[in-house]
Image (spheres, rainbow, N blue to C red):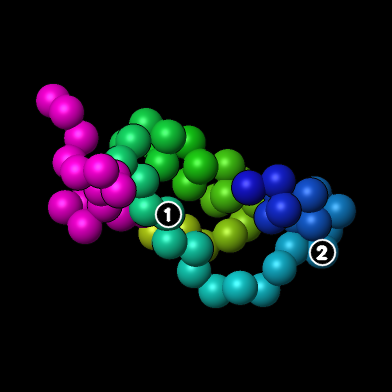
Amino acid sequence: MEVLEQPAFEERRFDIGVINVHSANPGGAARIAQVLRHWGYRVRVASGSTDVGYLDGPAAS
């Protein structure tokens, strides 16, 4: 995320369209989206999607 934050801080934000955040951690995804939106990036969050998982199988509940 620092790769995107630093240029935005220096007023040379990347023109990259929409950033898609995919995470099995809804709280972490929300925080990442919040920070990126603060710097003016367009963000879409896919947290909690059944398409998001772990390499060794589904998360334990």
Residue 13, image x and y in percent? 74, 63
Q: What crowding class fits label 1: few (fewer than 14 Cα within 10 Å), some (14-19), or many (20 or more)?
A: some
**Residue displayed at 55% across by 74% down:** 17
Magenta residues (range): 45-61
Residue 44: give its label: none
Residue 46, image x and y in percent? 30, 54
Note whether 18 is above or below 58 in the view shown: below
Hey, what amino acid is under mark 1?
Val
Residue farthest to the top, as pictured:
61
- Residue 45 versus residue 23: which sits nearer the camera? 23
Task: Work out how far the residue at label 2 is from the one at label 1, CA to CA, in angstroms.
Answer: 21 Å
**Residue displayed at 82% across by 64% down:** 12
Residue 58 is inside the magenta segment: yes
Residue 12: give its label: 2
**Residue displayed at 69% across by 55% down:** 4
Q: Which residue is mark 1?
A: 21
**Residue displayed at 58% across by 60% down:** 41
Residue 31, image x and y in percent? 48, 36
Image quarter of the C terminus: top left
Residue 47 in sight? no
